[in-house]
């Protein structure tokens, strides 16, 4: 094992490695065959006080990379003024021995002087990397306001020094992981980021260097963190998805150890760290608590069984057989083509979820109005988006599909979104780019599982461009105008059926006089088509690989049968190629 304290020495070694010069005979003697090109490099950044959790990262790197580099550096920039920088354990000899035993190729142990040019760096005197405030001002960031700036700065330096093929981090530090993922993405930093599972003691306690601070009794008390998360996971697996109930379950378990001081307990999205009111596809319950003087972290990711491969990195996915998702049906087309009616019935017949995208925009509009925000105030609407969690569930009456049940943050608003107030404002809300982006993200989360039918004007082109079956459902303007007229006649007749003293003939004549002329409907539909097809954002257009169905001379049942048959053919083709 090579030991370096100086950045220039490590860089020289890496340069020689790239050139394949001056390497000893046993440089690749750990079961990895010598590659034909420059060897792959794995970096495991640590602050020392190594334990089995760190060793699992090293082992993963050893399995996947030709050269394993471990860095040990207690980074002063990520400690606050009153935190445990001076007390943080530094068992240098033991760490070195563990690395050597784990077949580490290079151990990099720089000083603050080497990394920052001063033995006493602080964020006001060194160039720093500042992650998005939306990710750092919550959870740990509430009590450690500069911590993640320090983490981001040192990790950026290490990645640029080593330029690894892969860098390995532990899931226990979940907020750090999410921020570093964003950092690597936004700054185009070198190396693929690999997140490895939490390593736990036999009683479930997540391994941490700060566990050394615990007394015997505190060590036992600390296991309640894992017990609370296990209870949440069990409740989730039983079907509970709401934030309030999941937090209640965790707090009930934590109450058994009243000496533990809770810093935070939150349900968030593991990638964005946004607070979730409902777990639609994936969420994370995360906790920080003081046990004695030790501040401990833990978390559990909550995801549907179909998404269990989502935590695997690309390398791991290549080694495993990826389960085939249930196909998605994307139905696009102009207004009045019968998309919603057809989509609901197709979903019902095939046992799929009907993703009512229109209901989602209505739900957000309702939420905006409930908060007292004017729909034209785009900035305020955008700030509200992270706190609006929309959930759709299928609704069946007399074995016939109905519009889905809709809830926002756990509150059923199925009827509320159909009010005139919501209807009059939904177009204003839907036209805002931030709204569009957020709701497409939520729709695509549903799509990760597959097994959905969605309709709109850009489902196959923008929302689900990889949908297995794309349909473009259309009809002539005249046909759609006639259908609209028939619907209006039926609606008027129903509304005037009661409470009238006139004869049926008089009522019928009056109803028809209230209706718009056919020419007016044709003009209105033609104008709507032009508006939808020329929108600056997500215009109506037919996907190149969509199957067009013209419905002028077809009944709804015939259209449904065509789409159902196409789905079965595609599903069969997928099955035989597995």
Image: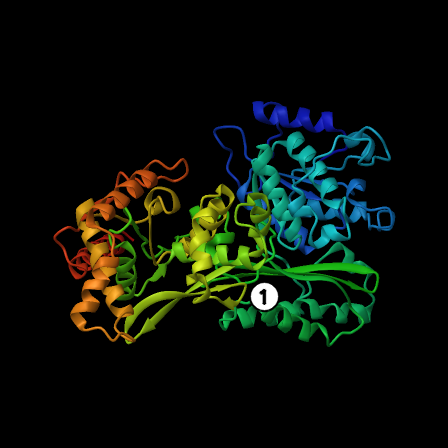
> Is residue 528 left or right of 256 when viewed as pictured?
left
On the image, the x and y values in percent for residue 40 come to: 55, 35
User: 537 or 65, which is in the foreground?
Assistant: 537
Residue reaching furthest to the left: 553
- State the colouring used for the structure image: rainbow
Observer able to see residue 42: no
Helix, strand or loop at label 1? It is helix
Observer able to see residue 36: yes
Q: Is residue 465 above or below residue 243?
A: above
Q: Is residue 216 above or below residue 192?
A: below
Residue at 41%, 62% in the rendered image: 418
Q: Locate the N terminus by quadrant.
A: top right
**Total marks in image:** 1
On the image, the x and y values in percent for residue 276 come to: 57, 59
Residue at 62%, 29% in the rendered image: 24
On the image, the x and y values in percent for residue 214 come to: 81, 63
> Is residue 288 left or right of 497 when viewed as pictured?
right
> Is residue 107 left or right of 483 when viewed as pictured?
right
User: 254 or 476, which is in the foreground?
Assistant: 476
Reading the image, the residue beneath label 1 is: 243
Displayed quadrant of residue 213 = bottom right
Q: In this view, does 544 lie above or below 494?
A: above
Residue at 46%, 55% in the rendered image: 309
Q: Is residue 256 above or below residue 72?
A: below
Rate crowding at label 1 as few (under 14), some (14 to 19) or many (20 or more) other CA atoms within 10 Å. Answer: many
User: 2 or 186, which is in the foreground?
Assistant: 186
């Amino acid at each position: 094992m090579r030991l370096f304290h100086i950045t220039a020495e490590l860089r020289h070694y890496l340069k020689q490695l790239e050139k394949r010069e001056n390497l000893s005979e046993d440089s690749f003697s750990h079961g990895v065959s010598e590659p034909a090109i420059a060897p792959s490099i794995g970096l495991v950044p640590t602050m020392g006080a190594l334990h089995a959790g760190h060793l699992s990262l090293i082992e993963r790197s050893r399995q996947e990379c030709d050269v394993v580099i471990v860095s040990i550096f207690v980074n002063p920039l990520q400690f606050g003024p009153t935190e445990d920088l001076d007390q943080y354990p530094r068992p240098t000899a033991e760490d070195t021995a563990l690395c050597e035993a784990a077949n580490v190729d290079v151990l990099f142990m720089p000083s603050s002087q080497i990394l920052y040019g001063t033995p006493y760096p602080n964020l006001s005197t060194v160039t720093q990397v500042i992650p998005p405030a939306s990710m750092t001002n919550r959870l740990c960031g509430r009590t450690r306001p500069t911590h993640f700036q320090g983490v981001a700065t040192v990790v950026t330096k290490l990645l640029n020094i080593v330029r690894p093929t892969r860098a390995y981090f532990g899931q226990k530090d979940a907020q750090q992981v999410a921020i570093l993922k964003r950092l690597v993405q936004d700054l185009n930093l070198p190396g693929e980021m690999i997140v490895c599972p939490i390593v736990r003691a036999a009683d479930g306690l997540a391994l941490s260097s700060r566990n050394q601070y615990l007394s015997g009794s505190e060590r036992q008390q600390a296991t309640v963190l894992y017990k609370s998360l296990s209870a949440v996971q069990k409740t989730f697996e039983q079907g509970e998805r709401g934030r309030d109930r999941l937090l209640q379950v965790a707090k009930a378990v934590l109450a058994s150890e009243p000496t533990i001081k809770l810093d935070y307990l939150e349900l968030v999205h593991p990638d964005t760290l946004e607070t979730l009111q409902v777990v639609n596809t994936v969420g994370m319950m995360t906790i920080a608590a003081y046990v004695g003087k030790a501040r401990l972290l833990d978390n559990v990711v909550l995801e549907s069984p179909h998404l269990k491969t989502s935590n695997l990195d690309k390398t791991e996915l290549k080694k495993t057989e990826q389960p085939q998702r249930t196909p998605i049906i994307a139905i696009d087309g102009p207004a009045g083509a019968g998309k919603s009616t057809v989509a609901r019935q197709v979903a019902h017949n095939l046992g799929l979820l009907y993703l009512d995208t229109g209901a989602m925009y209505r739900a957000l509009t309702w939420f905006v109005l409930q908060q007292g925000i004017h729909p034209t105030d785009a900035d305020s609407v955008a700030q509200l988006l992270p706190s609006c969690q929309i959930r759709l569930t299928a609704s069946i009456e007399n074995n016939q599909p109905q519009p889905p049940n809709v809830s926002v943050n756990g509150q059923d608003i199925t009827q509320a979104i159909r009010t005139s107030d919501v209807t009059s404002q939904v177009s204003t809300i839907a036209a805002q780019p931030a709204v569009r982006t957020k709701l497409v993200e939520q729709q695509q989360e549903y799509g990760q599982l597959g097994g959905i039918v969605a309709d709109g004007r850009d489902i196959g082109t923008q929302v689900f461009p990889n949908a297995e079956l794309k349909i473009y459902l259309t009809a002539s303007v005249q046909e759609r105008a006639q259908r609209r007229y028939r619907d209006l006649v039926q609606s008027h007749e129903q509304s005037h059926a009661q409470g009238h003293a006139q004869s049926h003939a008089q009522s019928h004549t009056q109803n028809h006089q209230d209706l718009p002329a056919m020419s007016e409907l044709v003009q209105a539909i033609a104008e709507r088509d032009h508006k939808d097809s020329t929108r600056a954002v997500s215009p109506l257009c037919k996907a190149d690989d969509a199957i067009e169905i013209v419905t002028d001379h077809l009944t709804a049942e015939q259209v449904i049968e065509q789409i159902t048959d196409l789905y079965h053919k595609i599903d069969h083709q997928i099955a035989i190629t597995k």
